[in-house]
Amino acid sequence: MTDQDGPQYQQLLARKVEVVNVGLEGFVKDLRDCGIDVVHVDWKPSAGGDPQMAALLAKLGV
Amino acid sequence: MKLIEDANQQALERILEGEPRLIDIVPARQLIPGLRERMILHAGPPISWDRMCGPMRGAVAGAIVFEGWAQDLPTATKLAASGEIEFHPNHHFGAVGPMTGMTTMSMPLFVVENARFGNRAYCAVNEGLGKVMRFGGNDASVLKRLAWLRDVFGPALGKAIRAAGGVDLKSIVARGLSMGDELHQRNLACSSVFLREVAPWMARTSTDNAVLAECLAFIGQNDQFFLNIAMAMGKAITDPANGIRGSTIVTAMCRNGTDFGIRVSGLGEQWFTAPVEMPEGLYFAGYSEKDANPDMGDSAIVETIGLGGFAMAAAPAVAGFVGAGAPSEAGNFTRSMGEITVAQNPEWTIAAMDFAGVPTGIDIRLVVDSGVVPVINTGIAHREPGIGQVGAGVVKAPLACFQQAIVAIAKDLGVS
């Protein structure tokens, strides 16, 4: 979020923030250290982000 | 893709419908017509002498002396290196073998018949702990034990098993899982239940009390005795599920100390290999990871049917033994393997998981998609020939095997 973002984002932070963190777990600790409730979702891109393998998997029904 | 889903359903049904029974112990030459003089079957995917690891070479030299093809180990090693010995994987002959997996013509093999499909699979007798050929041991004590297994134990147990009309294996495994076994690094319960079933038949068929006592003690003193029977069972269960076009279910996983190999149902006899990884685990006093050999053996066939590392939750004590964390974390391994399998086996359940079935039917698509690879509970061999086991641990199957198989099946189905 930047200073140019609109008032809706400022309102978002004006109330209690609850975060769903998807993917990299490193952000979770920092947020919790700030007293923010965080639910972590363990997620990785398909095939570790390998586009060729992900495309094959999509064709094979994953 | 409907073709794949239907094929996987068929492969899964064949795995779950297997009816494995131990029906005999017979010298290998009588079971495997192609097994002849100067031919050795080994664990894992195909490998030549020049790429074999230390313990595999040590076991090969020992097997050559055992069969009388050379008088001593140095001569045997020269013979093996000369190209005059044929090497083939156990899997190519309906067999499996733990660690180095040596199978030669005079060794007695367990015969497991899958009554549902009529196929058979074989595995040599577990030698016990200490210096043993499966860990590369090859000295006089190793060869003497193998000769006793061939001349005394094999015929005695074979007679008892035939008299009993065979031994049902699925029920032993079910009981073992409820008694703390995962069937790879802990077989104490299954070995004990097996002994309870065959001991009366051994007594009825024995004509020599001293031999009977020796044979009963050999089984009773070996906590891992049942492993080799479970391996033959695994092979007998998975073979009928191989060769179903379009199926992405894994039908074999094995390693030879150099390469890890898998077979996939829809791709038949083809191997997909990658360098085998080092196990992570705990070492016996006086040894460390510097002494360890990369992972070996056909024993990962038990993980292929949902046991071993896949059934870790049934055996929390094993998690500590193999250095895989606290016993309370054992369930995480089983849950994790549930992410890469298509079903649970309703006949093999785990009390600690509210009687969930063991995760069954590894789908290569789920492995590559998630990056979660099969975990295998394993023994660790010393990297030098002739020393033996130095620890136990967990090894991960290399992702590259599964990626290669994805490319191959996509090509076969014309979707690449």
Image (spheres, coloured by chain):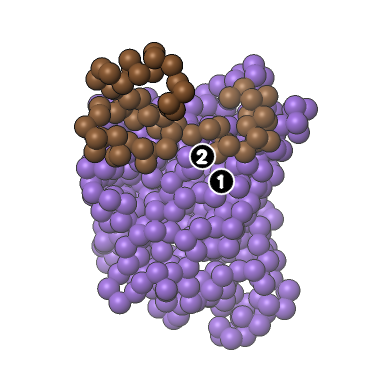
Chain colours: A brown, B purple
Q: Toward which corner of the image does residue B219 lie, by quadrant?
A: bottom left
Q: Note whether B86 is above or below B365 in the view shown.
A: below
Chain designation of label 1: B
Question: Horizontal placement of B165 versus B407: left or right?
Answer: left
Residue type at numbered disc 2: Gly
**Of residues B374 and B145, the one drawn nearer to the viewer in this rendering:** B374
Q: Position of residue B41 (x, y in %)?
A: 61, 60
Residue A61 appears at what percent x and percent y?
Answer: 62, 22
Report whether mark 1 lies on the same chain as mark 2: yes
Reading the image, the residue beneath label 1 is B399
Chain letter of disc 2 in the image? B
- Where residue A39 sits in the image (x, y, percent)? 31, 27
Residue kind at label 1, given as amino acid type = Leu
CA neighbours of label 1 inside 10 A, class few (<14), some (14 to 19), many (20+): some
N-terminal of the two: label 1 or label 2?
2
Residue reaching furthest front? A3
Rendered-image quadrant of the C terminus of chain B: top right
Residue A21: tell me if it is visible: yes
Image position of A6 with respect to B65: above or below: above
Q: Residue at x 30, y 69 (%)?
A: B284
- Residue B195 seen in render: no
Lateral position of residue B170 relative to residue B221, left or right = right
Answer with left or right where residue B327 lies relative to residue B348: left
Question: How far across and how far down the image is residue B106, in percent?
Answer: 56, 64
Q: Is residue B285 left or right of residue B17?
A: left
For residue B371, the mark is: 2
Query: Number of marks in the image?
Result: 2
Asked if labels 2 and 1 touch by Cβ distance under 8 angstroms, the answer is: yes
